[in-house]
Image (spheres, rainbow, N blue to C red):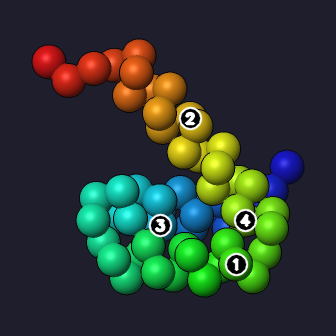
Amino acid sequence: MPDRDWLDELVELHVLAASGDSAAASAAERWMSADPAVRQAWTEVEKTCDRIRAENPPR
C-alpha cells in the first residue's frame, strides 16, 4: 500500500490536472517519469475516477 501522504498528493494533482491545471499536469508527469510506482498509482486513480463517473452520470 502506498504511503498515504504521497497518495493524497497524487490524487490532488490528478483532480487539478483533470480540471485543466497545466502546472499540476506537468508536475504529475515529471513525478510519474521519475517513479514507476507513482505512474501505476496514477493509472489506478484514473480507473477509479472513470468508474465513478460511469456510475454517476451528470443529471
Q: Name which residue lies at 74% across and 55% down.
A: 40
Neighbour tally class for label 2: few under 14, some 14-19, many 20 plus, Cα within 10 Å: few
Q: Quadrant of residue 23?
A: bottom left
Q: Which residue is identified by label 3?
A: 13
Which labelled disc corresponds to residue 20? none
Q: Earlier in the sequence, mark 4 or mark 1?
A: 1
| Location of the C terminus (image quadrant) | top left
Question: CB atoms at circles 3 and 4 under 8 Å apart?
Answer: no
Q: Residue under circle 2?
A: 48
- Dot 2 amino acid type: Thr
Is the residue marked by circle 1 packed among few (<14), some (14-19), or many (20+) residues within 10 Å?
A: few
Q: CA distance from mark 4 to mark 1?
A: 8 Å
Task: From the image, state whether disc 4 or disc 1 is nearer to you.
Answer: 1
Residue 53 place in picture, x, y as percent:
38, 28
Q: Amino acid at mark 4?
A: Val
Q: Which residue is mark 4?
A: 38
| Number of residues whose C-alpha sits closer than 10 Å to that of mark 4, classed few (under 14), some (14–19) or many (20 or more) | some
Q: Residue at x 57, y 67 (%)?
A: 9
State the image quarter where residue 56 is shown. top left
Q: Give 34 or 3, whichever is nearer the viewer.
A: 34
Is 56 located above or below residue 40 in the figure?
A: above
Q: Residue at (20%, 23%) from the top-left corner?
A: 58
Distance CA(mark 4)–CA(mark 2):
15 Å
Mark 2 or 3 closer to N-term?
3
- Pointers 2 and 3 in contact (C-beta within 8 Å): no
Instruction: Identify the residue under disc 1.
Output: 33
